[in-house]
Image (tube, rainbow, N blue to C red):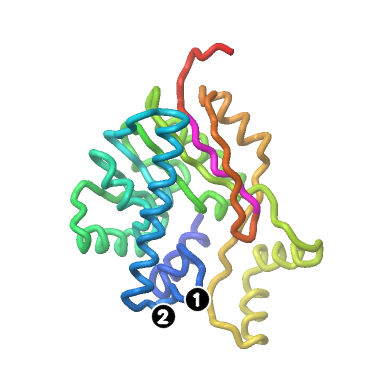
Amino acid sequence: MDRIEKQWDEFAEKDPYFAVASFDRFYTENLDEDNLLEFFQSGEEYTDRIWRLIETHLKPDFHPKRSLDFGCGVGRLAMPIAKRSKMTVGVDLSQGMLNAARNNAEKFGIGNLEFVKGDDELSRITGKFDFVNSFIVIQHINPKIGEGIFEKLIDLIDEGGIGALHVTYRQPGRTASILRYKLYRRFPFVYRLRNIVLKKKKEPLIPVYAYDLNRIFEILQRNDCHQCLVRFSDHGHLGVHILFQKMANIVF
């Protein structure tokens, strides 16, 4: 994942907030107090929605002791998750993103949040968790690696714990535009050349991959995640946000 790590470190240095939420108002040059407030408020709103869904459909009065946010970026979701947990771990591939997240946690006075650098094997993460979250993150990882990470995240959930994991499954649009995007993803220098020709802002291409939902649900079933709640997403790519409880020995 060296090339991907380099891309995210480049974002962390230049436009870390835009990399998390790709709207022009979150470019570093546009980040005023109001836009920053909107950015972090969106994380609070996401976490409120997740908690309501969990408490309504999976686990009433949900109060996790240990939570994990995979792909935490600058801490947009990790911080509100930490407010609702006894202890939270934020994981990210980019050290630059982790540095920004740590600064934000200190700024907002959140002391029960620690940060761990991620890798393909999640080798630096220890112990089990009552809640594991990852939103609009796994989609940026090639499924050859991402499916393994998806399963490892499930393995980190303790019996009775909750997962909220998101993947994309299709890029809508015309065949030509889909093929053009795949070309940019495979040959990043073509994308950079395109930006030069069109006089667009210099930035690395953020790859987005489609996952095979048959394989995703097979992983869930194989790992005793039998109670699942599915919500669809559309961020330019069609996706599914899967909330589930990990419980063995459930008989239907």
Q: Nearer the viewer, residue 125 or 243?
A: 243
Please identify the quarter of the rendering in which residue 174 is found: bottom right
| Position above or below: 213 against 70 | above
The crowd level at tag 1 (other Cα within 10 Å; few <14, some 14-19, many 20+) is few
Query: What residue range appears in magenta?
Result: 238-244
Residue at (40, 77) in percent of width and height: 28
> Residue under circle 2?
30
Q: Quadrant of the C terminus?
A: top right
Q: Secondary structure at mark 1?
A: helix
| Position above or below: 52 against 3 | above
What amino acid is found at the position of numbered circle 1 in the picture? Answer: Asp
Q: Magenta residues: mostly which secondary structure? A: strand
What amino acid is found at the position of numbered circle 2 in the picture? Answer: Asn
Dot 2 or dot 1: first in sequence order is 1
Quick check: is 239 in the magenta stretch? yes
Residue 33 at x, y percent in the picture: 31, 75
Q: Secondary structure at mark 2?
A: helix
Q: Nearer the viewer, residue 127 or 85?
A: 85
Exactly how many numbered labels are in the figure? 2
Q: Which mark is residue 24?
A: 1
Residue at (39, 23) in percent of width and height: 159
Quick check: is 122 in the magenta stretch? no
